[in-house]
Image (cartoon, rainbow, N blue to C red):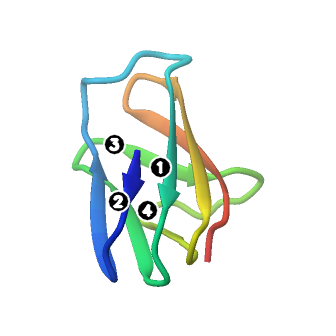
């Protein structure tokens, strides 16, 4: 997925992805891209206890991996 806005929020839906599904998100702008979990979804930063909305840096890349139903880990250019 590629986004080109100054400020944009994208949501990870529940009950859509299966374990092992991966989404790569590219923020093709100088603005901030917020990737948020929908209700009933957990989004965790890899190697951290941080959960919730991840802010993708300018021209940054974020990889999101479904590790179990409605549970995801994120790695990459997180602010």
The answer to whether the residues at label 2 and label 1 have Cβ atoms under 8 Å apart is yes
The answer to whether the residues at label 1 and label 4 have Cβ atoms under 8 Å apart is yes
Please report the residue visible at 48 percent of the width from the left and 64 percent of the height from the top: 27
| Dot 2 or dot 3, earlier in sequence | 2
Q: Between marks 2 and 1, how big is the CA–CA gap?
A: 8 Å
Q: Between marks 1 and 4, how big is the CA–CA gap?
A: 5 Å
Residue 14 in the image, given as x and y percentages of width and height:
25, 34
Q: Mark 2: few, some, or many residues within 10 Å (few <14, many ≥20)?
A: some
- Identify the image quadrant of the N terminus: top left
Residue 66 in the image, given as x and y percentages of width and height:
51, 29
Residue 33 in the image, given as x and y percentages of width and height:
41, 71
19 shown above or below 34: above
Please report the residue visible at 31 percent of the width from the left and 80 percent of the height from the top: 7
Residue pointed to by mark 4: 52
- The circle drawn on residue 43 is 1
Q: Between marks 2 and 4, how big is the CA–CA gap?
A: 6 Å
| Dot 2 or dot 1, earlier in sequence | 2
Please report the residue visible at 34 percent of the width from the left and 83 percent of the height from the top: 6
| Dot 1 or dot 4, earlier in sequence | 1
Q: Nearer the viewer, residue 47 or 62?
A: 62
The answer to whether the residues at label 1 and label 3 have Cβ atoms under 8 Å apart is yes
Residue pointed to by mark 3: 41
Q: Between marks 1 and 3, how big is the CA–CA gap?
A: 7 Å
Residue pointed to by mark 2: 36
């Amino acid at each position: 997925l590629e986004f080109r806005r100054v400020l944009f929020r994208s949501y990870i839906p529940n009950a859509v992805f299966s374990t092992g599904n991966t989404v790569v998100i590219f923020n093709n702008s100088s603005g901030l891209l917020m990737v948020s979990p929908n209700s009933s979804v957990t989004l965790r930063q890899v190697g951290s206890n941080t959960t919730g909305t991840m802010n993708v840096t300018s021209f940054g890349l974020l990889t999101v991996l479904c590790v179990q139903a409605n549970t995801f880990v994120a790695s990459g250019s997180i602010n």
